[in-house]
Image (cartoon, coloured by chain):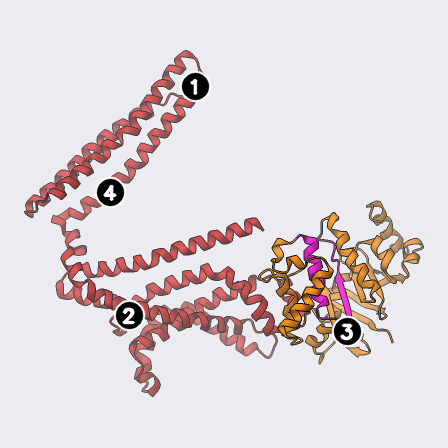
Chain colours: A red, B orange
Amino acid sequence: MPRDGLGFAGGALLLVVLLFGATLWVVGRVKQTMAINGFQALWADALLLGVLLVPLALLWPVLRGLGQARSARRALDQGDLIAARVASAEAHTWAWFALGYAAAWVIFLLLVLFFIANNVAVGRTFFQLELIASSFELVLRAFWVNVVIFFFAGLLSLVWGLIIAVAKLLPGRPAQPIRFLATFYTDAFLSLPSIIVIYLVGFGLPLTGIGFFRNMPLEALAVLALTLTYGAYMAEVYRAGLESIHPSQWAAARSLGLSYGQTLRFVIIPQAVRRIVPPLLNNFIGMQKDTALVNVVGVIDAFNQARIIASNEFNLSAVTTVAILFILITIPQTRLVDRLVERDRARMRQG
Amino acid sequence: MSFLEVREVVKRFGANEVLRGINLSVEEHQVVCLIGPSGCGKSTLLRCINGLEEIQSGEIRLHGDRISGPGVDLNALRREVGIVFQSFNLFPHMTVLQNITLAPTQVLRVPEEEARERAMALLRRIGLEHKAQAYPDQLSGGQQQRVAIVRALAMEPMLLLLDEITSALDPELVSEVLNLLRELAEEGMTMLLATHEMGFAKEVADKVCFLYGGVVHEEGPPEEIFKNPKSERTQQFLRSIIEAGRL
């Protein structure tokens, strides 16, 4: 015996009505806060009105659900089980639809409350628009330092990582010490927090007084530190990639007379690289974020610049700008990784 | 002295002794078939001759040269001894043409242009010149295996080892590969093949060796082995092959 779904749809209706009440209350609080701060604008009022309309819009799915539930009831009374089941399923879907959107709306309302709490303290601390606007150029210019550090450290660690990975995979007994060193290197740098490496390299190497390091700009030392750390990460990814190539490819190449090095270069590495592009890109993104750590040695990167502004102005909005900049450059890359992974999966399904 | 001499070769994987003092000889222009149950050491023997596996004792000689043990230039050896595998092992990231020209250009230093022409001639021979720019994935199993054979031939080896090269093929694709082998045999290519294709062995082989327990249990011309096997084991093996409808 299918259920008509009347109760469920009715519950959804009740919830949407309550949600409207809650929205009304939140909008009232916002309006009140605006009044206290002497802020009045037509666009703000229009926006608030729009916010009020959202829970009303949710009435539409709820009413459709209720309609379906009613026809399910009717069909049940007439003994038409199939029609009742169809209508009831529709009623449930619509009610769930309303509930899903309602849940998201509740979270939105909570965020608004958080934002205006304590007389818009959150808003003032993190999102002071005038400060964001006035400091934007300064922060953006400092962000360029992050981009440069990231670019060079990324490039260098890709090469360095490959060297380490190949060293770890060298065959035979004579290469044993090399293998050992490479393994120790990756173990050490995988376990070291990158902030410590940056600190040691950035402060320590110039202190040694060795001419080469003493005259190095801080940015270059930061690049060096990040390359050392991420070279180890990259090496692990490369190694996994190289080892994932089936031994039969080695056998085929070696049996044709190709040397170990030729086999790596023409057969193994080209295949491995295709597989490891997604994890390598993930490491790239991780490194990108770690460029913010170079502030510990005094490089004026975006974060450091923003901190200076923050302590001068007693407000964190410039740091918010940095956060947004990082998000903006990272999201496209994350999507790219997703797409590459998806493409690989599709190809494997094919093959 | 035969062209290829395998003498008392022992090969162990850990505690597992796969080859237990095996003896075998192949003359120039001969086709020798290795038959026997799975795990009898056919593939291992081929891989040892090509230097893909180290042997623990005994020796292998090619043209009188010792090609096993320390001090052997394996890369040089492999220029002379080609091997084709059950699972083709083409390089999936290269086109058919690149698969064939890679070793000649990199190992023998044949100029690019010349290597390409020779590869195209080989492809024409197997009727696949229109697939020169295709990738291995885009070929059927039989086509891939023929390309793999041609890839080995491009190095102009003195000896061709073939490791159950039709076992991974759909039945209707087996004949195109066997036909190519027949042609090669007629041209006088020296071949040592591990195979389950008894009909083919009967027709083409000059000698058939039945491997059992890591040694050559019985050997002789195909007529003899297939019609008149002497040992109990060989009879048993052939009986089960006949029961399976493979002979």
Mark 4 or 2: in front is: 2
Which of pointers 4 and 2 lies earlier in the amino acid sequence? 4
State the residue in front, A14 or A177. A14
State the residue in front, B160 or B117. B117
Whether residue A207 is situated above or below residue B159 in the rendered picture? below
Res B192 quadrant in image: bottom right
The chain letter for the residue carrying disc 1 is A
Left or right of B50? Residue A202 is left
The residue range painted magenta reads: B140-167
Question: In the rendered structure, does residue B155 fall within the stretch colored magenta?
Answer: yes
**Screen quadrant of the N terminus of chain A:** top left
Q: What residue is drawn where x is 39% and y is 23%? A: A88
Secondary structure of residue under mark 1: helix
Residue A330: x %, y % from top left: 34, 58
Same subunit: marks 2 and 3:
no
Residue A178: x %, y % from top left: 53, 77
Q: What residue is drawn where x is 18% and y is 54%? A: A127
- Residue highlighted by disc 2: A145
Q: Amino acid at mark 2?
A: Val
Q: Farthest residue in the top direction?
A: A78
Which of pointers 2 and 1 lies earlier in the amino acid sequence? 1
CA–CA distance between discs 2 and 1? 66 Å
Q: Are marks 1 and 4 in contact (CB under 8 Å)?
A: no
Secondary structure of residue under mark 3: strand
Residue B59: x %, y % from top left: 79, 75
- Residue highlighted by disc 1: A83
- Residue highlighted by disc 4: A108
